Image (tube, rainbow, N blue to C red):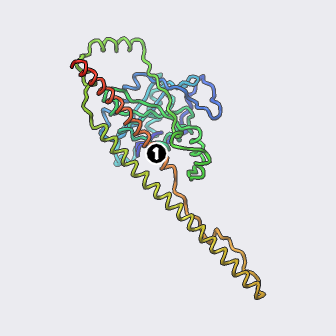
Amino acid sequence: MASRKEGSGAAGGGFGSAKGKGKAAAAGDSAVKQVQIDGLVVLKIIKHYQEEGQGNEVVQGVLLGLVVDDRLEITNCFPFPQHTEDDADFDEVQYQMEMMRSLRHVNIDHLHVGWYQSTYYGSFVTRALLDSQFSYQHAIEESVVLIYDPIKTAQGSLSLKAYRLTPKLMEVCKEKDFSPEALKKANIAYENMFEEVPIVIKNSYLINVMLWELEKKSAVADRHELLSLASSNHLGKSLQLLMDRVDEMSQDIVKYNTYLRNVSKQQQQKHQYQQRRQQENIQRQSRGEPPLPEEDINKLFKPPQPPPRMESLLIAGQINTYCQNIKEFNAQNLGKLFMAQALQDYNN
């Protein structure tokens, strides 16, 4: 179950799988091909952030629903309450059990199918999220994590994406071996760490009719801000975050290069030691003395520990996310600028 500490979480084994009449997925295939979300769930997630999220504050909650074939249907959710370090006696697991038990009593879907989390300018590719999603998928195979970006949503476009860990990354996390050799053997790169699952938002016919009525009553003037040519601080903030991650990647590269130099230096020392031992044995044999006993060279020269590469992969994945966000933002702005230029040329 998700935890509010650093956006991390761990799935508990106390909840059964939400699989209904679906079939088991083949080995190596994703168990979920599509995520269907009720509109009410989306509104609850947005409302949760508006009430408790402030700036880069992360809000989280539990997703409830069921699995039908290869489609995950999310029909309900509930948030994690805000609590401080003073609430040492607060039991998050017990809180979730009580919530799900209460939902079951009123005949509402109560099966655990994942969790959701808000993000700040797309900053969600972290070790905490990786550990949380691994715990969920390890306990419940069909689990997903929904990432809600309130900043992009405030600009007029709902930003809600569903992610799962790829089967390759799941195997690596099970082994808990994040060494460069293990990641290279598993062919893990930042591009194939997470897989995005398509999302479909579904409403009942009555809700669709209500939305249609509200759309007719909405003021047309409120939509003019979407055509504004002014560039917000979204681009500048995204570039600043991108630069910070590039600096972190640069530091990791320096650490890895230092490790490679230490390995090369140790190999030279081993070679020199072996040559000295060989020359000493030749001299002892010429004097009629027995050769020196062989020693375990690995005990004399302990190999340096390689730096963990998982952090570098996560930083690379976060850099890729920032680049995609900047690309989308610039594409929209360039489209409006070209449209404004065409209108100006037409008027002139």
Residue nearer the viewer, 251 or 176: 251
The residue lying at 50 percent from left, 39 percent from top is 133
Give the quarter of the image for residue 335.
top left
Amino acid type of the residue tagged 1 in the rendering: Ala
Which class describes the residues within 10 Å of circle 1: few (<14), some (14-19), or many (20+)?
many
The residue lying at 60 percent from left, 67 percent from top is 267
The residue lying at 48 percent from left, 23 percent from top is 36
- Specify whether 230 is left or right of 160: left
Total marks placed:
1
Give the vertical position of 211 relative to 275 (above or below): above
The residue lying at 30 percent from left, 14 percent from top is 215
Give the vertical position of 219 relative to 248 (above or below): above
- Specify whether 1 is left or right of 333: right
Secondary structure, mark 1, is: helix
In the image, farthest residue toward the right: 288
| Residue 324 image position (x, y, % from top left) | 41, 36
Residue nearer the viewer, 119 or 262: 262
Q: Is residue 48 visible?
A: no
| Residue 175 image position (x, y, % from top left) | 60, 48
Name the residue tied to disc 1. Answer: 316
Give the quarter of the image for residue 124.
top left
| Residue 341 image position (x, y, % from top left) | 27, 25
Q: Is residue 194 visible?
A: yes
In the image, farthest residue toward the bottom: 287
